[in-house]
Image (cartoon, rainbow, N blue to C red):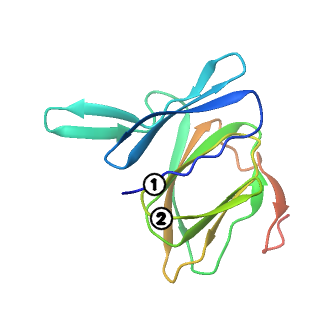
Amino acid sequence: MKTAFLWQRIYDCRLLVVGLESGFINLKLEIENRKLIMDRPRIIERPWGRYREYARNEPCTVWIVEMKPGQAGSLQYHENFDELWVMLTDGGQVQIADEVRQVRAGDEIFIPRRTKHRLSNHGDGLLRMMEVVYGQMSDEDKVRYEDKYGRA
């Protein structure tokens, strides 16, 4: 069974596990005033099966990250957007705040804005991850704390 690792930033927020079907987890994140800021992925049922919807008619950016073995991204956070990482291959390590976990293909990690995070490849092959950015994505909206390439 595939697993999903969940982290939440310490605010007045709740992370709700809405359902677990076929090894995938559905999430809702509510914050202080109970405003829903994350209800993804949505499972859309059809007669032939179903699909997982990560965004519909909302500002988002989607890309596939490909990281070489032994490499790591910056420890960083973003002010203006949330992220959802969907691991496509095994061998990854994710740091969210001070917690570090090994991740596998199929794991889904939600990262609220202003939460320090980093992806590392501890496997032998190329690490692939689909990243969905919710909100106005900007490369300038990045605060780096640590970076092995001298960009911090």
Please name the residue shown 31% across and 47% down the image.
22
Residue 13 point in image, percent of width and height: 69, 29
Residue ranking furthest to the top: 33
Residue ranking furthest to the bottom: 124
The image quarter in which residue 35 lies: top right
Give the foreground label among 2 and 1: 1
User: Could you tell me the amino acid type at mark 1?
Assistant: Thr
Residue 34 versus residue 150 in the image, above or below: above
User: Could you tell me the amino acid type at mark 2?
Assistant: Arg
To which residue does mark 1 refer?
Answer: 3
Q: How many marks?
A: 2
Q: Label for residue 110?
A: none
Asked if the residues shown at circle 2 and circle 1 are in contact, with their CB atoms under 8 angstroms apart, the answer is yes
Q: Is residue 110 left or right of residue 74?
A: left
Q: Label for residue 104?
A: 2
Instruction: Find numbered disc 2 in the image and state the secondary structure of the residue it sits on.
Output: loop
Residue 113 versus residue 65 in the image, above or below: above
Judge by depth and name the residue closer to the eye, 37 or 7.
7
Alpha carbon separation for disc pair 2 and 1: 8 Å
Q: Quadrant of the image for the C terminus?
A: bottom right
Instruction: Find numbered disc 1 in the image and state the secondary structure of the residue it sits on.
Output: loop
Q: Is residue 1 left or right of residue 61?
A: left
Residue 79 point in image, percent of width and height: 77, 39
Residue 38 point in image, percent of width and height: 56, 31
